[in-house]
Image: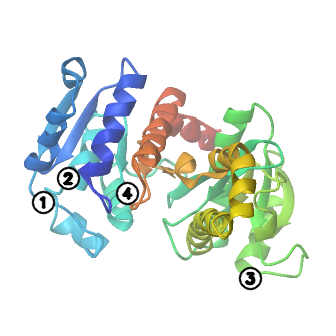
Amino acid sequence: MGGDFGPSVTIPAVMAILAQYDELRFILAGNEASLLRIQQLDDPRQSERIEYLFTEEYLDNQVNPLHAIRRHRNSSLFLAVDMVRNGRADACVSAGNTGALIMAGRHLLRTLPGIERPAMMATLPNLQAQGSCLLLDVGAHINSSAQDLLTYARMGGIVAQYQLQRKPRLGLLNIGAEVHKGTEVIKTAAQVLSTSADIDYIGYLEPAELFAGKADVVVCDGFAGNITIKTSAGVVRAIEALWLQIAGRNLINRGRALLTASMFKELQQTINPSLFNGASVVGLDGILIKSHGNTDSEGFQAAIRQAVQEIDAGLPGLIGAGFAS
């Protein structure tokens, strides 16, 4: 029940999801006083589908991820991941400390055979095709080797092929499309991917092309990926703020804003970062979804829906079978 806003965001999101999914059940881990506020909002029929795991220990974002394993085993985050390990839960959704979630996942769930390091995989809007694009890694590891990039490509390719039912197009995020550009790590990964029969490798993809619909999967290290998704969300919010400023400057602009209000609302709904909230930690023998810490209730609902989709798909088994073959 972490994140910047805690239960004030997560509890309304849980209530909304319970109303949408009849068979879904939740186990809420966290502070007793905070969690029991849900009773003030709860439909009696929905309360039967909620369990509680109370703990007073909470990990804020300043806690060293290594300490989460050694000193904070009674934290809500650690206990939530452990419920996936012991089979009490099918997935864990958290808006808490990212590094601690990755460390807890690796310690408790372990990586799948053939995978050394997990990755965080985000979904981005594909504006040209009105679809989406998978981007990984977006923050599990700041530094990645060429082998790591190849592993990310393989995992993303398996997921995309399941979603699209065709061979996915894959690109490497780079500073330019020319073959001589980029780090040695990127160049090495590109040489291997160019000979892959399982993936339609399209080459390097510049950041400006990320939303153009050229690729179904885009691979990068966690540093570049994390900056990319956070910058993208910031640009969307900046556009919204600028539009409102311009609309309010004078009477003529207000009139124009009223005439285009429906178009602006449709644009907001298409590129709203909240709708794409929820990065999947892929490569583990279990389902972990990392929600952005400062998301709203709508965004946390999107993260929960991501977990439901991965449960239905049996994502860890899907990736494990792909690597086994």
The location of residue 112, given as percent across then percent down, is 48, 47
Mark number displayed over residue 76:
2
Q: Secondary structure at mark 2?
A: helix
Which residue type carries mark 3?
Thr
- Give the number of the mark in front: 4 or 1: 1
Residue 33 horizontal/vertical position (percent) = 8, 48
Q: For mark 4, what is the residue?
A: 106
Residue found at x 74% / y 34%: 164
SS at circle 4? helix
- 217 on left or right of 144: right
**Of 288 and 58, which appears nearest the observer?**
58
* Residue located beneath label 1 in the image: 57
Counting residues from the start of the chain, the first of labels 3 and 2 encountered is 2
Q: Residues within 10 Å of mark 3 (few under 14, many from 20)?
A: few
Q: Which quadrant is the C terminus positioned in?
A: top right
* Callout 4 amino acid: Arg
Residue 147 visible? The answer is no
Q: Evaluate if marks 4 and 1 touch, with contact meaning CB atoms under 8 Å apart.
A: no
- Answer with mark 1 or mark 3, whichever residue precedes in sequence: 1
